[in-house]
Image (cartoon, rainbow, N blue to C red):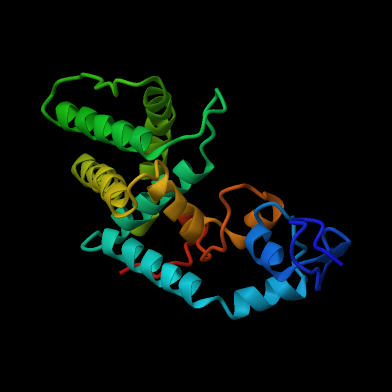
Amino acid sequence: MQCPECGTRKARRACPALHRDICAVCCATKRLREIACPRDCPYLVSARQHPAAVQLRQQQRDLARIVELLRDFSEAQARLFLLINRFLLAYRPPDLHRLVDEDVAAATDALAATYETASKGVIYEHSTGSVPAERLLRELKPFLRESAGTLGGLGKPPSDHDVVGVLRRLSDAVLEEGRYAPGQPRAYLALLERVLRDPAEKQDEVSPGGEGSVDATDARAGTRLILP
């Protein structure tokens, strides 16, 4: 019997989500992307326990990248960095247009410039030059102000100087990730999807850009990434 998904290959796997047999290729490529796989699907469980070599290399590269970005940060700065990235992961533009890396870089760069200007005693709101980035900036600024205050339990919350350092590194990281993956407007945001998105969330939200992810949670709930 031919696979009803592709119509070309033989259907050899019983899919518990679709309630019909599909081929191994469609099972592997559409899993958690187009097919809402139940958590107890044996093929899903097996794939997570024994990831393909290419996926394993991607996971190792992703984690190494995050660790590199957290280098020489204090614990408060590292947690603030993760908090901002979790915010970016959850952010949904009001016009339903997808956020792209360019918007993130522009918003974080402008916000860092605003903090730097304020530290010199001048109140000036730097703008981004684009509507999507400006909308992100307006949402990110109050979130950042509130989040920085919640980190006081770790000792001294990050100063404005520390916040600028976190924002600048984030902006640089977005641009650098774009150079690593040219032609991909969401290269950095895709990295966040793979590393920070909780697997349980991926189960409930099957999206075109989904991949298997490494588990990490919001720092306020206790991150499962080991901070340097």
Residue found farthest to the front: 8
Horizontally, is 4 left or right of 93 in the view? right
List the single residue furthest toward the left.
Answer: 120
Q: Could you tell me residue 46's position as x and y percent? A: 67, 78
Residue 28, horizontal then vertical, whole percent: 65, 66
Residue 64 visible here:
yes
Task: Please name whichever residue, 84 or 95, is drawn nearer the observer in this view of the structure.
Answer: 95
Give left or right: position of 213 versus 139.
right
**Residue at the spot x=34%, y=35% of the render?**
102
Q: Where does residue 201 sit, x and y in percent of width and height?
A: 64, 54
Question: In the displayed structure, does residue 56 sit left or right of residue 155?
Answer: right
Residue at the spot 28% in from the left edge and 21% down from the top edge: 127
Q: Which is more toward the observer, 84 or 207?
A: 207
Q: Residue at x 39, y 41 (%)?
A: 185
Q: x and y percent of residue 40 in the render?
A: 77, 71
User: In this figure, what is the number of numbered marks?
Assistant: 0
Q: Looking at the figure, which quarter contains the N terminus?
A: bottom right
**Which one is nearer the viewer's eye here, 82 or 69?**
69
Q: Quadrant of the C terminus?
A: bottom left
Q: Quadrant of residue 67?
A: bottom left
Q: Is residue 150 visible?
A: no
Q: Residue at x 71, y 70 (%)?
A: 24
Q: Quadrant of residue 130?
A: top left
Between 226 and 52, the one nearer to me in the picture: 52
